[in-house]
Amino acid sequence: MNAGPSAFRPCVVIPSYNFPVAIRRVVLAVRAYVPDVIVVDDGSSEEGRAAIAALGVEGIATVHHRAANGGKGAAVKDALRLARDAGFSHALQVDADGQHTLEDIPRMLEAARDAPTALILGQPVFDESAPKARLVGRRITIFWTRLEVGGSAIADPMCGFRVYPLPVSAEVNVWGDRMDFDPEIAVRLVWEGVPTRNVETRVRYVSADDGGVSHFH
């Protein structure tokens, strides 16, 4: 059974693969809203791994290192299980590259508090930094996702800024371990009867100079 409003205890989960520049900045920013942060290092190279290990040493995040790179989905699965086992009621997923508008965290959490059994999905509002090819690909994915769930319960299946209800999100069977994880877990949770809420949020694409690295293929 999902936790009710009286037991609302969220954490932030951040999968990270070679974001040594951005990861600390993102963790410090989310801690302004949620003190409990779980970072899963998905087999980063030495620099990325060291940056994440430092967060654990300083006590500003719970850190879990995967022995090898398994993909974003594999890292989030580990993070959701860690969050469930630690007794959290919800896990707010944030990407490590800094592209999400973290000022929208209170709105996302408020939606989760108001509908504690629901999957809260970020619905991106893109600025001029968004590559046109990405936007076209996104529209195709949205089309197929709507066919899978029979409607518009999932406004955008690819946005990694979302709040998962626990424990169901840690226990649903998801095959995808890479970027396919985000749309698949949303679809499977809808199939399980989990309601959804879509919350608009601004998204920007981060330059390499600011630590932005794309692992999307």
Image (cartoon, rainbow, N blue to C red):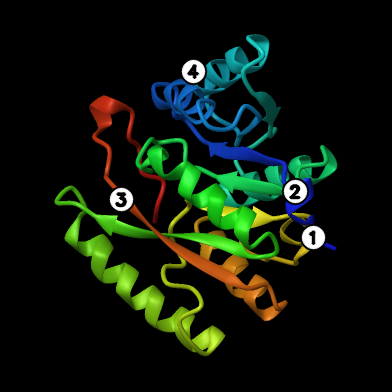
Q: Which residue is mark 2?
A: 89
Q: Nearer the viewer, mark 4 or mark 2?
A: 2
Give neighbour class at mark 4: few <14, some 14-19, many 20+ (Cα, 10 Å).
few
The residue pinned by badge 3 equals: 202
Q: Position of residue 123 (x, y in %)?
A: 39, 62
Q: Amino acid at mark 4?
A: Glu
| 58 displayed left or right of 207 | right
**Residue 63 at x, y percent in the picture:** 68, 26
CA gap between label 1 and label 2 equals 7 Å
Q: Is residue 172 above or below residue 206?
A: below
Give the mark, 3 or 1, whose residue is nearer the N terminus: 1
Asked whether disc 1 touches disc 2, contact meaning CB atoms under 8 Å apart, the reply is yes
Q: CA distance from mark 3 to mark 1?
A: 29 Å
Q: CA distance from mark 2 to mark 3?
A: 26 Å
Q: CA distance from mark 3 to mark 4?
A: 30 Å
Q: Position of residue 46 (x, y in %)?
A: 53, 19
Q: CA distance from mark 4 to mark 2?
A: 33 Å
The residue that disc 4 covers is 47
**Structural crowding at the residue carrying mark 3, measured as other residues with C-alpha within 10 Å and reported as few (<14), some (14–19) or many (≥20):** some
Q: Earlier in the sequence, mark 4 or mark 2?
A: 4
Q: Which residue is mark 1?
A: 2
Secondary structure of the residue carrying tag 4 is helix
Residue that appears at 69% across and 50% down: 77
From mark 4 to mark 1, how far is it between C-alphas?
38 Å
> Is residue 177 visible to us here?
no
Farthest residue to the left: give it.
Answer: 128
Q: Amino acid at mark 3?
A: Arg
Q: Amino acid at mark 2?
A: Ser
Along the viewing direction, whichever of 132 and 108 lies nearer the viewer: 108
Q: Position of residue 9 (x, y in %)?
A: 72, 41
In the visual, does 140 lie left or right of 120? left
